[in-house]
Structure formats: C-alpha cells, structure tokens
Amino acid sequence: MKILVTGTAGFIGSHLSLKLLERGDEVVGLDNINDYYDQNVKYGRLQRGGIIQEIEEGKEIPYGKLLTSSTNPKYKFIKLNLEDKKAMMQLFEKEKFDAVCNLAAQAGVRYSLTNPDAYIDSNIIGFMNILESCRHNNVKNLCYASSSSVYGLNEELPFSTNHNVDHPISLYAASKKSNELMAHTYSHLFGISTTGLRFFTVYGPWGRPDMALFLFTKAAIEDKKIDVFNNGEMLRDFTYIDDIVEGVIRVIDNPAKPNKNWDKKEPSTSSAPYKVYNIGNNNPVKLMDFITAIENKLGKKIEKNMMPLQAGDVPATYADVTDLVEDLGYKPATPIQEGINKFVDWYLEFFGYNKNL
C-alpha cells in the first residue's frame, strides 16, 4: 500500500513508518517538526529513515517539498502543517494514498492548560483537513490517534471502549474525543472507514522527552530529584512502542466495517464503517514500581519529591482490550522491566552517557 503517516518525526509515527517500509509498503511521512520538545530527537528519528543524513546548523528543512530517503526510495517526507488546507489537498491529489494513519497532534495534558490554541489548530482544524482530504480524494481507509485521556472522570476500571467518555478533564482529551465524533460523521456521510486508537501511556526508545520515563531517567543519571505526582499512587497501563506499532498495523490492514447488528449502546462501533480500539498493556503498573524498574536498570536510587495530583491528570488508566483480541487477534504483552531496559540502553547511547553507569 501507499500510506500517509502524519507525525512521522514523532515517537509512534517514526517507529510505524520504519515498520511499514520494512514489510514493503510505500510511505509518505508528514510532520511540521515543531519545537514542543527537543527537535534533535525528531531529527534523529528522521535520520533513522534516511530522510536527513546531516542537519546543518541554522539550516531549515524546506516547507512543502517532498524529500526522498537516501536509504529507501519508498520513503518520502514532507514538512507541512495539518492546518494548511491548500497544501494538504495538493499532497493528497498528487500522491493518491491507499490509506492514511494520522498520528500528528499537539500532545500533552499539562501543556493544554497553558497553550490551548495549539490543540485547536492541530487537533481540530488539522484533523478536519485530514477528513476533507480523504473525502475529496477517495481515501477510504483512515486510522488516527485518540488517547486513553478521553476516559476523563470515568472511574470504572478497566476502561472499555463502550464506557461513557463525555466527561474529559483536559482540552487535550476533549480534542481527541472530538476527533472520534468527527470521524464517525465522515464514516456515516461518506463511507470512509475510520478507526480511532486510544493509546495508553506509550514508552520505549526514541520516546518523547516530556514523558515520565525520559524525565526520570535523565534525573537519575544526573543525581537530581524527580517530581512524583499523586504521591506515587498513580496507576498507568504502560504500553511498549513495538506493541503499539503492531496494533496500528493490524488496524491499517483491517479497515473498519459497518456493524450490521449494531446495538446503539455500543459507542465503539456503528452502522457506519467506524471503530474505536484501546491499545494498552492490559496490566496497570504503580508509578512507584515503574520508577523502581528504572532504578533496577541503572543500579541506583532516585530521589523523589512527592507531589499532589495535577490538574488534568487521571489517577489510573487500565485498558480493556477485548475488542482488539477478538477482532484482530492481538494483545500487547511486553513486560515493564524489559521495555524500560531497552529504553535506558537507547537513552545512554543517544545522549552519549557512559554505558557503565
């Protein structure tokens, strides 16, 4: 297939793009490479795919120009904003995609408290442009990133895709729920197969520098204190990146179909070609146990600053992946210590630390 992967310089998008190329697909990657976090990590991810071999100091990647990988002719990259409707339409008209996986978004719960406009631009207007581009260019296979944050004030565990998600507690979560509603509309009106993926706390090599694993590992190496929110009582369904990518690929290969026996009490499916899945490890881990796994790998204790629950955070996440297993025969399973070991090995190498720490 020829697949558009938006957010290809991002954490999940970069891993997904390389995996699709590995199996023989043609990939066009799109990203605006914004400065929400360290751009060197984003450039490093692109270099893995042969898009950029050397970043010259002060030199910008040209906007709106398709670049071809130096190592794989089936991989192209374009620097573009999702909000740029004209450029998006032109890209779709030119490239004629078989499928689209939209992973580009303004991420982060806490950032949405201080920079709400960024979420409207990228996550709402940008997603609208994705839907319109699919509609007008006969793309019938769309999957997109949602988030476990949509469960908001829901306290019923594990989180099921058939639970009510009408009470988000951050604008980020609200923007992701909006994507699911918008996608259903286009599935119903225009027959586009859309599948939303509610990711649960993704971690692993090449991860986001604003995420806990990155921050904790850096602090541990530098002998600094870490802020531990909710006094360490957080429960998170940490999901390793390779497990996430496998789930996404299975969704790309199995576009949503109309449910002829649809029960209107099941919001995760529809009479339209629409579906929502949880992709999580189905095994929540206490934040303190997560920190202990980092300490085990590094062989040192981390000083902790115990903090209250932060605005916009939910105290626990836990994915019910029944639909994922039944429909796609898949369930994430990487143990937390194994995943953290792989991350720390990558972190020490990428940032040039002594591996004997």
Image: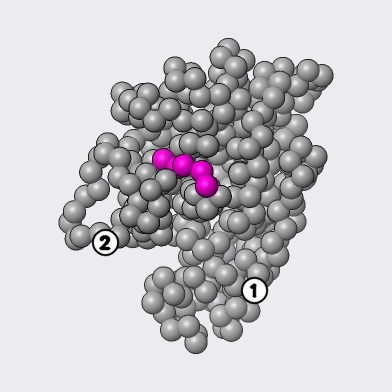
Q: Quadrant of residue 286?
A: bottom right
Q: Amino acid at mark 2?
A: Glu
Cα distance in 3D space between marks 2 and 1: 37 Å
Q: Mark 1 highlights which residue? A: 292
Residue 66 — which label? none
300 or 29: nearer the viewer: 29
Instruction: Please indicate whether residue 224 sits to the left or right of residue 261 in the image.
Output: left
Q: Earlier in the sequence, mark 2 or mark 1?
A: 2
Residue 68 lies in magenta, yes or no? no
Instruction: Please indicate whether residue 126 sits to the left or right of residue 143 in the image.
Output: left
Residue count near mark 1 (Cα–Cα under 10 Å), binned few <14, some 14–19, many ≥20? some
In the rendered view, would you say 164 is above or below 136? Answer: below
| Front of the two marks 2 and 1 | 2
Q: Identify the residue at image location x=60%, y=37%.
A: 252
Query: Most prominent secondary structure in the magenta stretch?
Result: strand
Q: Amino acid at mark 1?
A: Thr
Q: Which residues are magenta?
A: 24-28
Q: Mark 2 highlights which residue? A: 54
In the rendered view, would you say 260 is above or below 149? Answer: above
Q: Quadrant of residue 148?
A: top right
Visible in this render: residue 200? no
Disc 2, SS: loop
Farthest left residue? 58
Q: Quadrant of residue 184?
A: top right
Disc 1, SS: helix
> Percent x, y for residue 49?
41, 55
